Amino acid sequence: MDAPLSLHIKTFGCQMNVYDSGRMGEILKAQGMTYEERLGEADVILINTCSIRDKAEHKVLSLLGQLKPLKEKNPKRVIGVAGCVGQRIGRQLLQRVPHLDFVVGPDGIDHVGELVDGVVKRGERCVDAKLDTDGRSYSQPLLSTAPKVAEYITVMKGCDHFCTYCIVPFVRGREKSRSIQEIVGDVERLVAQGTKEVTFLGQNINTYGKGSAETLAQLIERTHEVRGLERIRYVTSHPRDMGMDLISQFGNLEKLCPALHLPFQSGSDAVLKRMSRLYTSAEYLKKIAALREACPDIALSADVIVGFPGETDEDFEQTMTVLSEVRFSLAFLFTYSPRPGTKAYELSDDVSREVKEERLARTMKLTMEIIEEENRKRIGGIESVLVESIDKKKGRYFFGRSLHNKIVHVLNAGPACVGKVIDVEVTEANGSNLKGYYVDAERIDRVASL
Ligand code: SF4
């Protein structure tokens, strides 16, 4: 009998890609594969790709180049590309990269087992990049066999918005949702196996259920009833679609964590219009005010793009004003990156790289100052932390997340705390993270004892 094939998956991009990689891993493991931590040692190497920025795409192409000698060393090694780059340029990739065996787009991930089989057994190089354009609903129950304390669940896919800079609607298609019944079934199964927190994923999650009678507010309410589940989050919201039904839930539903990611992208109405974001800066700030009225302690995070075509100094200062006024607890800040196929690609990319970088640096400096100021205010206070695991990178402290989605390193927590919500007294604010002590345990720093 042949030895089982080993698998390594390298994931780029967003949480949805992480979720898709997990799913492909489960499918391939069910076919008998084992996981190999070292990419260079794996029989099957799968790269799950991101296409949101030019840089992300370049990284994938460069990694593919590095894999050539590995394939030459062992021609039986299988190399596949999944995700948004696969969807966007899958066919060209297969032609341009002879050592690439297969390409699978985001809607084909459930076929990954057949694709690998085709390569291994029949030497078939192939592309499965067909977008699922049929209807508004789809079914994809969870496969997860070893759930984590905090799990992500994709509840919908695609986006109908067509913001002018964004490639997502082209590579992930139109919005389609899973049913509440199927999702709640997943949550119940996860909770029965120890999961305490779920984060629902969707590119434009507020319009979950489009084309049916189901809404995100209903999904949250139904999930809230699941016994044993302690925390619910969702991402990503669009300011225009963040209705009062959703806003008011932050004040009313105990398990809904007081944290929301609400990208604003630019503080300038002229830029927002060119981005086709469908709201003004004043409308965005009004939503923020309503959220803070419903839940005064809510932590807000956002995405911002600087250097969009035509962005003047004045436009940029308006972005800085929104950052100062809202005081986000986290912000993902980017320079504009033109993506072929989008509407903004036709606009002149007229903000120089130096100006983009300078604006980015200013937004980063301001954001970090605000985050650090706000984090310092938490020193001496108690955070309710769901402990997830030991910090694998640092290999020292156990860590978890606060209700506000802050990473909290707990200096005196041990394995018995994993999966529990514990009270942690914050003693240190370190960049965007917090550190502290579990109040019900002896105050020893486990670093000394590990
Ligand atoms: S709402 Fe988000 S995913 Fe949809 S097009 Fe706009 S930026 Fe892209």
Image (cartoon, grey):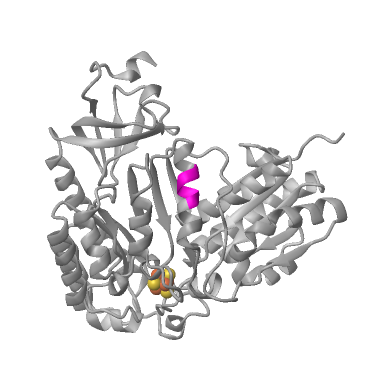
Q: At which x and y percent is residue 148?
A: 47, 38
Q: Is residue 362 magenta?
A: no
Q: Residue at x 47, y 38 (%)?
A: 192
The residue at the point 45 percent across, 83 percent down is 343
Please identify the quadrant where the N terminus is shown. top right
Q: Is residue 80 above or below residue 2?
A: below
Q: Position of residue 21 (x, y in %)?
A: 57, 51
The range drawn in magenta is 185-189
Residue 330 at least partly seen: no
In the figure, 280 relative to 256: above or below? Answer: below
Front one among 197 and 171: 197
The one of 424 and 181 positioned closer to us in this rendering: 181
Total of numbered circles in the picture?
Answer: 0
Q: Is residue 198 left or right of residue 147?
A: left
Magenta part mainly helix, strand or loop? Answer: helix
Q: Nearer the viewer, residue 5 or 333?
A: 5
Q: Is residue 21 left or right of residue 300?
A: right
Residue 273 visible from this viewpoint: yes
Q: Which image quarter holds the C terminus?
A: top left
User: Relative to residue 134, is residue 307 drawn left or right?
Assistant: left
**Residue 357 higher or lower than 66, as above or below:** below
Q: Which corner quadrant of the image does residue 445 belong to?
A: top left
Quadrant of ligand 1: it is: bottom left
Which residue is at a point 60% across and 57% down the rendered structure image? 62
Quadrant housing residue 104: bottom right
Q: Residue furthest top?
A: 449
Q: Position of residue 325 (x, y in %)?
A: 13, 63
Query: In x, y percent, where is residue 95?
Result: 74, 69
Q: Is residue 386 left or right of residue 123?
A: left
Residue occupying image coordinates x 28% and y 36%: 385
